[in-house]
Image (spheres, rainbow, N blue to C red):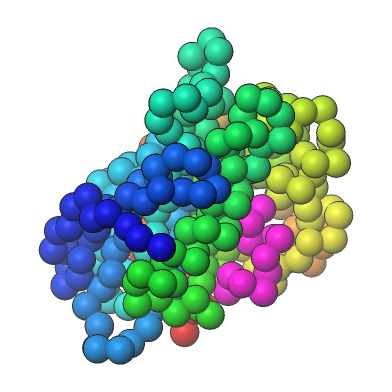
Amino acid sequence: MSIETVSTARAFGGTQGVYRHASAATGTDMTFSVFVPDHPAGARLPVVWYLSGLTCTHANVTEKGEYRRACAEHGLILVAPDTSPRGEGVPDDPDGAYDFGLGAGFYVDATKAPFDRHYRMWSYVTEELPALIGEQFPADMDRQSIMGHSMGGHGALTIGLRHPDRFRAVSAFAPIVAPSQVPWGQKALAGYLGDDRAAWRRHDAVALIEDGARVPELLVDQGEADNFLAEQLKPDLLAQACEAAGIDLTLCMQPGYDHSYYFISTFMADHLDWHAARLK
C-alpha cells in the first residue's frame, strides 16, 4: 500500500502527520491524520483510533482535540480517519442536509443505491485503514483501542462491541448510543441500509448489547448542556442496556458542557489516560 504525505509538523516530541491514499473500500482518495510520539528505534506503539462526528473530517480533532501531550506522555499513536468518502461522483444528501451523505458516513457499509458504491466506511475503518497503519507506521496492532465523538462515538461503540478481541478499551464523547431510536440514526440507517431493521441492529450499540455483544467496560463523557442530549443521544438507554448486561459503564455527566470540541478537549486527557492503562 502506498500513501502520500500531505503535511507533517513537530509537536510534543512527536510527529503530527496528515496523509492521503487511494482507498479500495470507498473507491475514492481518503485523507487521515496520525500522531506518532518519538520512540526508540524498532519499537512498536499501541494505537488509539478516534472517530469523528457529523460534518467533521480528520482535521477537527487534529486541530482542536488537544490529545498530543497525553499521547506523547503515554507513548500512544492516535489515528483520525475521515467520516465519509469524498470526491467527484460521490453522492450526497439530495437536500444538502448535514446529517446524511458527505461528512456523515455513520461507519456503515451502505447496501442501498446509489450510496453502496462509495459509502463503505465500516470496511474502511475496520479493515483497510488498519492494514495500512500496521504497514506504514510503527504500530503495535495487537494493542489497539477506539474512541469517538457523537456519530463517531456511535462508530466506536459498535466497532468495539463487534470486535471485542481487537480493542482493549472503548470510550466515547456524547455518542449516539441507539441510532435506531433517534432521528439522526433513523435517517442514516434507512438511507444507507434500507428498511432491514435486522441490519440496523448491527450498527446500534444498545441493540448490539441487547443481542448479546459484550465488552468488559465502557467510558462515556456527556455534557449536560448538550443541545442534542434529549433527542439524539439518550445516554440513559446505554446505561440501562449495560446494567442489564453486566457491562461496567462509567457514564460521566458533565455540568455546563455542550457538544463542541471545547467539551471534548477538556476531557480528552482523561480518556487517553484510561486507554493507556488498558493498552499497557
| Residue placed most toward the observer, 119 or 66 | 119
Q: Position of residue 147 (x, y in %)?
A: 50, 57
Residue 40 placement, left or right of 22: left
| Residue in view at x 22 percent, y 50 percent | 6
| Residue in view at x 84 percent, y 35 percent | 197
| Residue in view at x 48 percent, y 58 percent | 129
Q: Position of residue 234 (x, y in %)?
A: 66, 38
Q: Position of residue 132 (x, y in %)?
A: 44, 64
Residue 158 placement, left or right of 77: right
Query: Does residue 143 appear anywhere in the picture?
Result: yes
Q: Position of residue 45 (x, y in %)?
A: 38, 79
Query: Does residue 185 appear anywhere in the picture?
Result: no
* Magenta region includes residue 197: no
- Farthest residue to the left: give it: 10
Q: Give the residues drawn in magenta, as a range.
A: 154-168
Residue 36 placement, left or right of 29: left
| Residue placed most toward the observer, 74 or 78 | 78
The number of callouts visible is 0
| Residue placed most toward the observer, 93 or 243 | 93
Magenta stretch, main secondary structure class: helix
Quadrant in the rendering for residue 3: bottom left
Q: Quadrant of the N terminus?
A: bottom left
| Residue in view at x 67 percent, y 31 percent | 192
* Magenta region includes residue 167: yes
Residue 127 placement, left or right of 203: left
Q: Image height check: is 252 above or below 151?
A: below
